[in-house]
Image (cartoon, rainbow, N blue to C red):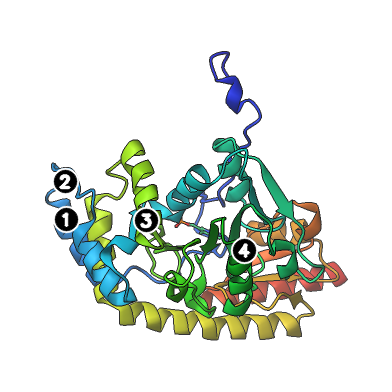
Amino acid sequence: MSRFFSDKFSSLEAYTPGEQPKDMKYVKLNTNESPFPPSPKAIEYASRAAESLQLYCDPECTRLTEEFSKLYGIKKDEVLFTNGSDDALNFCFSAFCDDETPAAFADITYGFYPVFAQMNRVPFTEIPLNEDFTINVDDYIGINKTVFIANPNAPTGIALPLYDLERILQSNPDNIVVIDEAYVDFGAQSAVGLIHKYDNLIVTQTFSKSRSLAGGRLGMAIANSSLIRDLNTLKYSTNPYNVSSMTQAAGVGTIIDDDYTKKNCAVIAENRGYLTNKLEELGFTHTPSVSNFVFAKHPELDGGELYRSLKERGVLIRHFTKEKIRDYNRITVGTKEQLDILLKNIKEILQEARA
Ligand SMILES: *Cc1c(COP(=O)(O)O)cnc(C)c1O
């Protein structure tokens, strides 16, 4: 830290993204990216957009908003596009939390929430999950704070049914509830249909996971128009050009080719079943994931050891050092071929550990 760095950030601990090593080619199952390339339409549209990069992009994301609102059955002023959904989540912490209205989220959830809270200098409460890593809904009833829930949660993959989300929304009518649906397309129920029923609901989603555009950086907040106006005020006060023209075009191409996304999600759901069955056969236990990753541990293997041994063998998974979850690893559901390489290596590691 230089002597010029503001005191207000002296204790800020930045988010640690999953590694993207370039030293060799890994079977990459560590950051929940899609194993499939973007839709050919997305590539075609983005390439065409590249020809006009001398111009600023459309700050209103007009075409993207039209196509997206049609697909989702919402009005055009009920969505805001952002530079990945992280951008939208950051705006939510900034817009809807302060000293009088702290943030609340689970102790085991997306690691960016506490960072956004600190960055925006808002107090926050971390609410412990149950032993089995489920959310105790009663903890959130009438909590009087701005609530952030990843649904399905990360890194557990466990989802709450809409019924439980509605109880939280109903019991906190004067507070915003943000539902982070980064992984919703892999099998959970979406809360988007509730944005007219609850004026305190904001749903964030992303093109990074199910839509194969992690490097494009495209996310969105979906809510009633007055909440979207608030978020727009922050966007236009930060960077009106937060979604590049190539990314807007890639987004349009992806939406037009929505069947491609649906097909890929079905393959991932099938592969998730394959992976969990094979892991169980090898003695692993895991949480009931409806996401594109599996959160698993083995009684004979240390979580960190398994992660390191697999990395040496060219397979990357994600290990977290937090006390409560350090026995576990989060494994992204890849292609069958990738999973077979992973499983073969785990078998060998197990054999070595037992020898
Ligand atoms: C990946 C992820 C996001 C956001 O990713 P972006 O690439 O910024 O859209 C948000 N929440 C959770 C829980 C995630 O895992």
* Mark 2 close to ligand 1, CB under 8 Å: no
Q: Residues within 10 Å of mark 4 (few under 14, many from 20)?
A: many
- Mark 1 closeness class: few <14, some 14–19, many ≥20 residues within 10 Å: some
| Three-letter amino acid code of the residue under disc 3 | Ser
Label 3 and label 2: CA atoms lie apart by 32 Å
Picture quarter containing residue 63? bottom left
**Residue that badge 3 annotates:** 226
- What residue does disc 4 label? 154
Looking at the rendered structure, the secondary structure element under dot 1 is helix
Which label number is shown at residue 53?
Answer: 2
Q: Is residue 355 visible?
A: no
Q: Which residue is mark 1?
A: 49
Tell me which numbered mark, 4 or 2, is placed earlier along the sequence. 2
Disc sitting over residue 290 in the figure: none
Q: Are marks 4 and 3 in contact (CB under 8 Å)?
A: no
Q: Nearer the viewer, residue 229 or 83?
A: 229
Ligand 1 within 8 Å, label 4 CB:
yes
Q: Is residue 210 left or right of residue 247?
A: right
Q: Secondary structure at mark 2?
A: loop
Mark 3 or 2: the one toward you: 3
Q: Nearer the viewer, residue 286 or 340?
A: 286
Q: The residue under label 4 is which amino acid type?
A: Ala
Left or right, 168 with reference to 246: right
Q: How far is the residue under mark 4 from the one under mark 1?
A: 34 Å
Q: Amino acid at mark 2?
A: Leu
Residue 300 shows in this picture: yes
Instruction: Name the residue type under label 1.
Output: Ala
Q: Quadrant of residue 29?
A: bottom right
Assign a secondary structure to mark 3: helix
Question: In which quadrant is the N terminus drawn?
Answer: top right
Label 1–label 2 contact, CB within 8 A: yes
